[in-house]
Image (cartoon, rainbow, N blue to C red):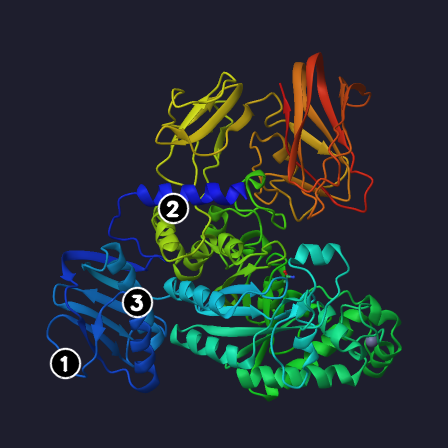
């Protein structure tokens, strides 16, 4: 509750102190833009001069009416005060490309398609908005997207939103030139789409007797009838969907519907238990693939979906099937025998192949989460890579098309700043800068493989987003960063430029009624370790601009009277840094407190008795002594991850060395099974063979603790040795991770 209020106050202060605009604040950044002399004054209405016709003309006019740009259409030519929108079949750029020229006489957009004209209009609108729709600076823009698929995914199952909410997000997608809305309409927490043939999907499986997903999940996970007074949830009627589809079409957005199969289908199996292996409610989460009834059901559903949605791609889910029920189900076993399937992965693949044939027979293609690769990928399938990029890489190398949505860059349900300051999220950590840094084409790709990467998408899973406000808070501004990932060529991307533009964009979004996260005031400390000079340069920065950062190095709390940060700080040995952002002399964020060491183990040889995980390799074992400290999230490339394994590291300091301080930092994040080590044992040795105990450091943080927690294991004293051993065993729990960023030896 408090957090909401303070966010709101921050937003207000941002509105009052927005940085001065420059004239090139378009998001996503155009590929080429030159600012000319003069301006177009927006006094009276602009005359729309266009060769658009029919529905395309109608849509464009209707859309313009929803904006602040005053335009009228008389069908006549006009020599001044015009908005020309010209379709040119010979146009030099791609389907979504456009040129926009603005001078004192008017604005002219040229494109091959109405999509391109629409994106030219978006750029014009952003330029006009910068000057309060009083004028537009003279510009020439030549622009087209890097990727053809630029999407947002929204989970409607865990929490249901509303027609109005969806339309509002479509407005934002249009503003940022994004063109796909992946609508996750079905999942185990509720079915959200009217299917005429199967009414129990929406009069039963769309309702839960709990307000939030978390209450429901922690209780019995039962559904209820729509007319139950306790019923919460909802669904979209086919009429609702048609209305939303028209809204999307006017904004040049394709809605890709998702119908989950074979997993994440508890709600269907509660409504129609005969489609499960157990023939019973609340027993399985996967469809029974042995039964023909399953295929009859799915084909009926997909027929209605295909009749309703014009999207070429139909998303068939495919993720996280449990598959265990299939191993003992007589129907599934019979199917496997008849079809000569070796294992349950092949059984899943059998299903996806069959569904693909059906969808193809209707002139459409399937797209699915990367698990559809398991057991053999269907021939025409497109893969949405979410468990990292591996699935996408495998698929592209086999000649399949790919949309990249890897968790480490595209999961907008992760925390976006220090978790201790945020409303509860599912876990993980994904800052705006990390999203912005994403390049959907793997470095190893050939040009041909790169062409198979259709684009990129942000995924919004809503387990921990019970309200619409909170959902927007998680979407924005990270989606804005993703729009530039999808649109702007690498050579035109620039974090510092984006940071300025997104700082200007936040108050605009608030003015339009959105609830964005208003950018972090958490102090970030990017470092550069200089191994020759034996020192570390530390910068202090935060996402939100216009802040004064004050810091201390004597352990005291920073105040406005403490030194103001200007240039990077130099650490020769140990610095006890405290820093805080201030705005107008008042604290505007939490205090960062961090010890930074150019320590005695930096660059020394480390030997691990047990391997680290290849999924979180940082820069190998040497990352434990490279001087670089991890941030708030284990996925930042600085934390070394150990899966189901103890950490057992020996550092060779090269010669007998005086020791006064040894420490290592661990973290716990319950959701993703990241645990602090049970304890940290420190041993020392002179020969690397015979070790003696120096300390056994414990902690009292329970594995039940929900909040992301960091703990420093510290020994201080007097000793002398050549070898230091750190032994940090995994807790007695059913598997999980240990992450360490550094072992500090002073
Ligand atoms: C997913 O996040 N399960 C696709
Ligand atoms: Zn079965």
At a point 82% along the width and 66% down the height, the residue shown is: 324
Which callout, 2 or 1, points at the residue further toward the start of the chain? 1
* In the image: residue 723, left or right of residue 75: right
**Residue occupied by mark 3:** 67
At a point 39% along the width and 27% down the height, the residue shown is: 565
Residue extending farthest front: 229
Residue extending farthest left: 79
Q: Is residue 417 visible?
A: no
At a point 44% along the width and 72% down the height, the residue shown is: 253
Q: Nearer the viewer, mark 2 or mark 3?
A: 3
Which callout, 1 or 3, points at the residue further toward the start of the chain? 3
Quarter containing the N terminus: top right
Residue 327's place in the image compared with 15, above or below, is below
**Residue occupied by mark 1:** 77
> Quick check: is the Cβ at mark 2 less than 8 Å away from ligand 1?
no
Q: Residues within 10 Å of mark 1 (few under 14, many from 20)?
A: few
**Residue occupied by mark 2:** 499
Gap in Å between the C-alphas at discs 1 and 3?
23 Å
Q: Position of residue 342 (x, y in %)?
A: 82, 73
Please tell me whether mark 1 sits on a helix, a strand or a loop: loop
């Amino acid at each position: 509750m408090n957090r909401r209020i303070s966010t709101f106050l921050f937003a207000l202060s941002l509105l009052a102190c927005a940085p001065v605009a420059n004239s090139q604040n378009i998001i996503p950044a155009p590929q080429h833009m030159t600012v000319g002399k003069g301006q177009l004054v927006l006094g009276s209405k602009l005359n729309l001069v266009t060769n658009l016709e029919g529905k395309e003309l109608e849509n464009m006019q209707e859309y313009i009416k929803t904006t602040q740009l005053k335009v009228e259409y008389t069908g006549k030519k006009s020599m001044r005060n015009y908005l020309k929108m010209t379709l040119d079949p010979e146009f030099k750029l791609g389907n979504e490309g456009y040129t926009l020229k603005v001078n004192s006489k008017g604005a002219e957009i040229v494109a091959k398609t109405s999509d391109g004209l629409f994106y030219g209009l978006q750029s014009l609108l952003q330029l006009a908005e910068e000057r309060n729709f009083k004028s537009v600076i003279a510009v020439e823009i030549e622009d087209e997207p890097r990727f053809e698929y630029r999407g947002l995914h929204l989970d409607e199952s865990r929490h249901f939103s509303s027609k109005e909410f969806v339309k509002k997000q479509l407005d934002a997608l249009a503003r940022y030139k994004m063109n796909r809305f992946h609508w996750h309409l079905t999942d185990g927490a509720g079915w959200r789409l009217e299917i005429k043939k199967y009414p129990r999907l929406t009069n039963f499986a769309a309702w839960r007797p709990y307000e939030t997903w978390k209450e429901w999940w922690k209780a019995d996970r039962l559904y209820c009838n729509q007319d139950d007074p306790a019923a919460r949830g909802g669904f979209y009627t086919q009429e609702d969907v048609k209305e939303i589809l028209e809204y999307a079409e006017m904004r040049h957005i394709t809605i890709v519907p998702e119908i989950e199969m074979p997993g994440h289908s508890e709600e269907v199996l509660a409504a129609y238990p005969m489609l499960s292996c157990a023939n019973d409610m609340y027993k399985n989460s996967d469809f029974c693939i042995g039964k023909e009834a399953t295929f009859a059901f799915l084909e009926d559903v997909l027929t209605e979906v295909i009749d309703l949605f014009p999207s070429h791609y139909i998303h068939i889910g495919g993720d996280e099937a449990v598959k265990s029920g299939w191993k003992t189900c007589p129907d599934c076993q019979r199917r496997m025998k008849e079809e000569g399937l070796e294992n349950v992965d092949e059984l899943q693949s059998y299903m996806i192949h069959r569904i693909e044939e059906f969808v193809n027979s209707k002139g459409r293609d399937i797209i699915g989460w990367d698990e559809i690769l398991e057991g053999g990928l269907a021939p025409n399938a497109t893969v949405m890579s979410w468990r990292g990029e591996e699935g996408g890489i495998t698929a592209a190398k086999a000649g399949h098309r790919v949309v990249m949505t890897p968790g480490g860059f595209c999961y907008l349900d992760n925390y976006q700043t220090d978790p201790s300051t945020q409303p509860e999220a599912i876990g993980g950590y994904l800052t705006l800068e990390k999203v912005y840094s994403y390049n959907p084409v793997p470095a190893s790709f050939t040009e041909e493989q790169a062409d198979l990467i259709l684009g990129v998408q942000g995924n919004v899973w809503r387990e921990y987003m019970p309200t619409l406000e909170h959902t927007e808070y998680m979407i924005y501004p990270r989606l804005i960063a993703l729009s530039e990932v999808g649109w702007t060529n690498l050579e035109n991307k620039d974090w510092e430029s984006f940071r300025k533009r997104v700082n200007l964009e936040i108050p605009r979004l608030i003015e339009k009624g959105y609830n964005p996260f208003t950018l972090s005031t958490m102090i970030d400390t990017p470092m550069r370790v200089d191994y020759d000079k034996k020192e570390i340069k530390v910068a202090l920065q935060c996402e939100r601009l216009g802040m004064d950062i004050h810091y201390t190095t004597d352990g005291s709390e920073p105040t406005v009277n403490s030194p103001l940060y200007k240039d990077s700080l130099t650490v020769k040995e140990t610095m006890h840094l405290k820093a805080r952002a201030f705005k107008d002399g008042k604290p505007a964020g939490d205090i960062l407190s961090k010890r930074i060491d150019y320590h005695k183990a930096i660059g020394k040889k480390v030997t691990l008795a047990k391997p680290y995980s290849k999924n979180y390799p940082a820069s190998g074992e040497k990352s434990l002594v490279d001087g670089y400290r991890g941030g708030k999230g284990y996925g930042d490339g600085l934390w070394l991850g150990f899966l189901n394994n103890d950490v057992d590291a020996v550092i060779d300091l090269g010669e007998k060395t005086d020791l006064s301080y040894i420490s290592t930092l661990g973290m716990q994040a319950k959701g993703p099974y990241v645990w602090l080590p049970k304890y940290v044992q420190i041993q020392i040795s002179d020969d690397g063979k015979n070790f003696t105990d120096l300390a056994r450091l414990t902690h009292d943080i329970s594995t039940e603790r929900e909040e992301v927690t960091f703990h420093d294991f510290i020994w201080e004293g007097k000793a002398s040795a050549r070898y230091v051993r750190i032994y940090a065993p995994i807790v007695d729990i059913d598997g999980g991770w240990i992450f360490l960023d550094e072992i500090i030896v002073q």
